[in-house]
Image (spheres, rainbow, N blue to C red):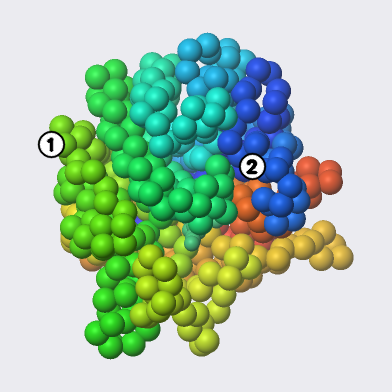
Amino acid sequence: MPYFPEDFIFGVATASYQIEGAWNEDGKGESIWDRFAHTPGNIQDGTTGDVACDHYHRFEEDVALLKELGVDAYRFSISWPRIFPEGRGRVNEKGLDFYRSLTGKLQEAGIKPVVTLYHWDLPQKLQDKGGWESQETVEAFAEYARFLFQSFAKEVFLWITHNEPWVVSFVGHYEGRHAPGKRDFKSALQVSRNLLLSHGLAVQAFREEKTLGSIGITLNLTPVHPFSDSEEDILAAKRCDGYFNRWFLDPLFKGEFPEDMLLWYEKKGFALPQLSEEEKSLIAQPIDFLGINYYFRRVVGKGEGAIFEVEFFNPPQSEYTDMGWEIYPEGLYEIVKRVSEEYQPEDIYITENGIALPDQPDSKGRINDQKRIDYLRSHLLALHRAVDEGCPVSGYFVWSLMDNFEWGFGLSKRFGLVYVDYTTLQRIKKASFYWYQKVVKSKRVD
Ligand SMILES: N=[N+]=NCCCCNC(=O)[C@@H]1[C@H]2[C@H](O)[C@@H](O)[C@H](O)[C@@H](CO)[C@@H]12
């Protein structure tokens, strides 16, 4: 029976724009996701995060759910425009008070706070001045981070500078499906560079402020498999591995963007200015852990697609989630093994893993999400194998505590261990809540 170590951290994760609501209350400034969701056509089901789970007003009820779940830690993000409505300068005390109350309730419940500094809700005022393409945002992020390290100097267990810089860069600035909705590959490359620089400045500030806890960054990593063993499919998979994974792993742990990708982008007309020696050491300064968000793998072959010349495949024999993502538990084992061996991080936390399902209450108001239990079990067993083989993994967070606003899909995709009825905002614990409660308590997956 696979047991996790006694001190292994089990948690759940959320993010500010996805759960808080109160989008313009108590002095909060507008974020790029407020603007993006308010723009008709951007969100598939036409909903917004204006109310979402109304966590801003119901956080005490939600902390009580966390306490009942028995988690060791709770990962949430701080809404930058709730603290600095204009991005920098004036502080919104009521915004700061909300997070002080939340961390206070967590401490009362014996739950370790894990804080993500940036989970995509950039102050709109900074976007109006160029957003992540601009050096001003890099500097503003460093100020924002330093202010939070000073304001929560002792309360936080883990600090995560950025959540998924790949998504911020390429889904937000190339694919255009996320805020700010740009479709410009050159912008996306510039954004990825600035996110890494801002991460480095935040880590420096963390060390200078002698803040308690640990600091790291969270990447969404996906194993990339060639559709066939043909030379061109293997090369296509290598290109995609560079695009999805190595583009951030290499600068963070080796101080360089991957050479093959720089050459490929240059060949496609997107020459990226070299990082200076100072920038390389800023980005690659030591961090205490790497956060990995894992959901699925990618299967690719040679294709005619513009920049990457790849085609994606969905293996017919696999099962898929409500997001259309392949269920591939071994991918979690693969990515943890690969990262441990190739990049030797101090420590790893699986900061997100979960599944969207079309959950609905039955006639008795219960939600029997057995498929979510099967997904979480299979992924925890895969993770356990990596831990058993000596990979430095110290924790695992389910995405998500509760159903929430799923970005471009709006409220239509449900990832929660807790169901949210968006008309009444009632929370309903799913079968997976009780299953995970047992895992957390026993540290065992059966
Ligand atoms: N092409 N493409 N890819 C799309 C992005 C990769 C997969 N999605 C994620 O990793 C996001 C992560 C996010 O932190 C959270 O805020 C989201 O709610 C979850 C669920 O979606 C996951």
Q: Residue at point 77% right, 63% down?
A: 360
- Judge from the rendering whether residue 82 lies leftward or rightward of residue 276; answer left or right: right
Q: Residue at point 33% right, 32% down?
A: 198
Q: Position of residue 285 (x, y in %)?
A: 19, 36
Judge whether residue 444 can be spotted in this image: no
Instruction: Kindly identify which residue carries mark 2.
Output: 36
Q: Is residue 131 above or below residue 337?
A: above
What distance separates the C-alpha of mark 2 from that of mark 1? 37 Å
Q: Determine which quarter of the picture holds residue 338.
A: bottom left
Q: Position of residue 410 (x, y in %)?
A: 68, 52
Judge whether residue 47 can be spotted in this image: yes
- Judge from the rendering whether residue 365 lies leftward or rightward of residue 112; answer left or right: right
Q: Residue at point 57% right, 75% down?
A: 320
Mark 2 or 1 closer to N-term?
Answer: 2
Task: Name the foreground residue: 258 vs 384.
Answer: 258
- Judge from the rendering whether residue 322 lies leftward or rightward of residue 436; answer left or right: right
Q: Does the closest atom of ligand 1 sit within 8 Å of the Cβ of label 1?
A: no
Q: Tell me the kind of residue under disc 2.
A: Phe
Instruction: Kindly identify which residue carries mark 1.
Output: 277
- Judge from the rendering whether residue 419 lies leftward or rightward of residue 227; answer left or right: right
Q: Residue at point 38% right, 20% down?
A: 143
Q: Position of residue 195 (x, y in %)?
A: 36, 39
Per the image, label 2 sits on a secondary structure element best described as helix
Q: Tell me the kind of residue under disc 1.
A: Glu
- Disc on res. 99: none
